[in-house]
Image: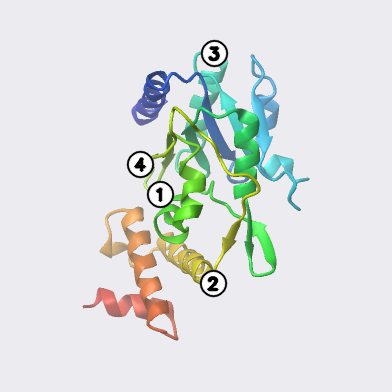
Amino acid sequence: MSLMDQEWMSKLEQFARKLALRDVYLIADQGVLDNPLLDGLNRLSPPVQWFSLYQGQPEEPLLEMAPLLMRLEPVCWQHRQWIADLIAAFSCKPGLLIFLSPLSFSTLAAHLRNLADGAWEDRSGLVRYYDTRMFPLLMQHVLTEEQKAWFLEPVYLWSYRDRDDKICWLEGECSPVQATIPEAIKINFSDEQMMKLDVAIDAQQFTVSEKFSTFFTTQEEKFNTLWQLGWQAHQQNFVGDLASWFESHFEE
């Protein structure tokens, strides 16, 4: 493990001990990896509880591509090594969310599966909140306060890597006295929320290209700036090439 990875693992263990938790929960998106995780996961001892967030979705048969929720105990050496291996495997890749929660695995599995099932108008589809490029955008700019609470209230903290491989932390709102979550929830996106996500897709495409890179020192700075400018373009009813809109602002 790199020094940064070791520090991440150490802090997770420290937080877990402070909160009197044995478990660490991970959501790992197999779709961004070269090899599926299930063979290795099923060989661990003691056995690991896991759940596919594709369950009940049209994508359910694609188990080897599915985002997996896993409950791991760092005090068990095989579990700890598995966490370390996942942290290394997802270096510079989106798709590893780690969190701490006092809730049971079955409760969290049902809840997180519901959060992955979104809707817009009369259409439904996956909410890929486990994509760590989109997770902070959802929490900061897209979701309503009620929708954000569905992510924060069951959890003490979330942790992930950003586009620059920097370790990030998001504090949850879970109460150690009473942690409950609503049943039968569904994220119903408004037209404005969907437009914000569309702007994010454009901003991400420009972020991974060389265009405009000389104006930024980090990938996160580039994405966030382009997203803000893209959203401004939408609000001002701009019609035309988005790259020209960006250029006009960088030339100022």
Residues 72 and 113: in front is 113
Give the alpha-carbon distance from disc 3 to disc 4, as whole Å. Answer: 27 Å
CB under 8 Å between callouts 1 and 4? no
For marks 3 and 1, the one nearer the N-term is 3
Disc nearest the viewer among 1 and 2:
2
At which x and y percent is residue 50?
Answer: 66, 30
Q: Amino acid at mark 3?
A: Cys
Q: Which mark is residue 210?
A: none
Q: Amino acid at mark 4?
A: Lys
Name the quarter where the C terminus is drawn: bottom left
Give the alpha-carbon distance from disc 3 to disc 1, as whole Å. Answer: 31 Å
- Residue at the spot of label 2: 191
| Depicted 53 relative to depicted 128: above or below | above
- Residue at the spot of label 3: 76
Question: Secondary structure beneath disc 4?
Answer: loop
CB under 8 Å between callouts 1 and 2? no
Disc nearest the viewer among 4 and 2:
2
At which x and y percent is residue 251?
Answer: 24, 77
Q: Amino acid at mark 1?
A: Arg
At which x and y percent is residue 133?
Answer: 46, 52
Question: Secondary structure beneath disc 2?
Answer: helix
CB under 8 Å between callouts 3 and 1? no
For marks 3 and 4, the one nearer the N-term is 3
- Residue at the spot of label 1: 163
Residues 154 and 159: in front is 154
Q: Quadrant of residue 3?
A: top left
Question: Secondary structure beneath disc 3?
Answer: loop
> Badge 4: how crowded within 10 Å, few (<14), some, or many (20+)?
few
- Residue at the spot of label 4: 166
